[in-house]
């Protein structure tokens, strides 16, 4: 897949509030959840009714261009109409280097796709995902392979539950 830079006039306002995402989706489109790690990008996709998050295989990080190429292919395969990305804020609510890195990733991504992006507070998502995998009796080795996608599913499910509560 060739990456094409979106011109300014082609780009919609890409970073939006979570509550705005459903109105921006065409019929049958899904939302994709992302958990940015330093070595992998966890990916999850919603069903078309925006009620359930399903983990997808992780994207191994190499360099931004390759990472985004793989991500854009996944977004197209899942008929994504929007992205929910975990924002790693500190426990006190402040934003540290990881949150800044996530925001920089989104700034670079928005030049390459018109899809709207909403941030979701991901505090404790990896811990919750690991606990769920332990409860499912997944071995340590397999947990290491699946943790980022499980965290992405946890992030996306939280966002979907919020949207569902809003009606």
Image (tube, rainbow, N blue to C red):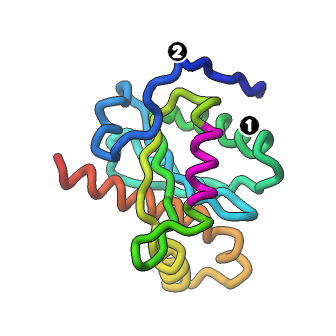
In reply to whether residue 28 is colored magenta, the answer given is no
Seen in the picture, residue 12 relative to 136 is either above or below; the reply is: above
Identify the disc placed on residue 53.
none
Q: Contact, CB < 8 Å: mark 2 with mark 1?
A: no
In reply to whether residue 104 is colored magenta, the answer given is yes
The mark lying in front, picked from 2 and 1, is: 2
Please tell me whether mark 1 sits on a helix, a strand or a loop.
helix
Please state the extent of the stretch shown in magenta in the rendering: 100-109
Seen in the picture, residue 19 relative to 135 is either above or below; the reply is: above
Please provide percent x and percent y for residue 142: 69, 75
* Residue labelled with disc 1: 69
Residue at far top of view: 9
Asked whether 107 or 48 is in front, the reply is: 107
At 80% from the left and 42% from the top, the residue drawn is 66
Asked whether 47 or 159 is in front, the reply is: 159
At 50% from the left and 83% from the top, the residue drawn is 131
Please count the marks in the image: 2
């Amino acid at each position: 897949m060739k990456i094409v830079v979106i011109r300014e006039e082609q780009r919609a306002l890409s970073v939006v509030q979570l509550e705005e995402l459903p109105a921006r989706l065409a019929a049958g489109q899904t939302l994709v959840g992302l958990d940015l790690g330093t070595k992998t990008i966890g990916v999850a996709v919603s069903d078309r009714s925006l009620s359930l998050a399903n983990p997808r295989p992780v994207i191994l990080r190499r360099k931004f261009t390759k990472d985004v190429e793989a991500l854009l292919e996944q977004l197209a395969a899942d008929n994504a109409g929007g992205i929910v990305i975990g924002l790693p804020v500190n426990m006190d609510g402040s934003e540290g280097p990881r949150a800044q890195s996530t925001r920089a990733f989104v700034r670079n991504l928005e030049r390459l796709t018109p899809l709207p992006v909403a941030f979701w507070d991901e505090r404790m998502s990896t811990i919750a995902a690991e606990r769920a995998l332990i409860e499912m009796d997944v071995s340590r080795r397999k947990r290491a392979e699946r943790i980022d996608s499980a965290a992405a599913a946890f992030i996306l499910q939280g966002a979907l539950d919020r949207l569902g509560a809003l009606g």
